[in-house]
Image (tube, rainbow, N blue to C red):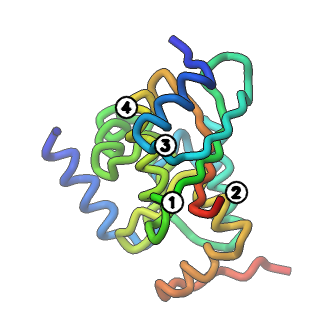
Amino acid sequence: MAMSAEEIESLIKESIPDAKVKIEALKDDGDHFSAIVISKKFQNISKVKQHQMVYKALKGRMGEQLHALALKTSSEF
Amino acid sequence: MDQNIQEYIKKEISETEVILFMKGTPVFPQCGFSSTVVQILSQIGLKFKSIDVLSDNEIRQGIKEFSDWPTIPQLYIKGEFVGGCDILTEMFQSGELNSFVESKGIELQKPST
């Protein structure tokens, strides 16, 4: 069961409300996307932790319905 | 959580300076992301041990629980989880990976010119 860019964006924003999110489909199969997520919450935390926050927001879909998410995170708008 | 898998993983990671959990092997990577990380490590001249998670599904799931990271590949340097393909690519492009490795006291093999 694939996902849509909108679904990914809304899941991320649900857990990270101030996030600015840009999602692009890398393939049109619904499970390869790239995402840029910018949030103040990422300040002073490691890249690994920033990405883990985004994966948690996706509530277990990462690596399951969502095979690939090329992720870039930043704390600066 | 299967205890002896977690023990095995912990032991491998603590006893190996640089270890990459990947899909396939460095010579025959079975996934683009794993292959990208292998290329990055060989380009900076970092020797590493690899574990093919496709050869044992318990390791494949166990490593995700161990690091609370949902995807493969996963690179560990001196027991520390450094990242997956995205983070390693970013670190490689910014030069941060070289300085991180050297800060851990690990020598990079200069490419034979």
Pointer 3 indicates a residue of which chain?
A: B
- Which residue carries the number 2 mark? B39
Q: In the image, what residue type sits under mark 2?
A: Gln
Pointer 2 indicates a residue of which chain?
A: B
Dot 3: what SS? loop
Dot 2: what SS? helix
Q: In the image, what residue type sits under mark 3?
A: Ile
Q: Are marks 1 and 3 in contact (CB under 8 Å)?
A: no
Q: Nearer the viewer, mark 4 or mark 1?
A: 1
Q: CA distance from mark 2 to mark 1?
A: 33 Å
Q: In the image, what residue type sits under mark 4?
A: Lys
Above or below: residue B53 compared with residue A3: below
Numbered circle sitting on residue A40: 1
Numbered circle sitting on residue B72: 3
Quarter of the rendering containing residue B13: bottom left
Residue at (31% x, 70% y) in the render: B15
- Which residue carries the number 4 mark? A59
Q: CA distance from mark 3 to mark 2?
A: 15 Å
Q: Residues within 10 Å of mark 1 (few under 14, many from 20)?
A: some
* Coordinates of residue A9 in the picture (x, y in percent): 56, 31
Q: Residues within 10 Å of mark 3 (few under 14, many from 20)?
A: many
Q: Residue furthest top?
A: A1
Residue at (61% x, 45% y) in the render: A20
Judging depth in this view, the residue of A73 and A66 nearest the camera is A73
* Coordinates of residue A17 in the picture (x, y in percent): 46, 42
Q: Nearer the viewer, mark 3 or mark 4?
A: 4
Dot 4: what SS? loop
N-term-proximal mark, 3 vs 2: 2
Relative to B40, is B78 on the left or the right?
A: left
Residue at (15% x, 46% y) in the render: B4
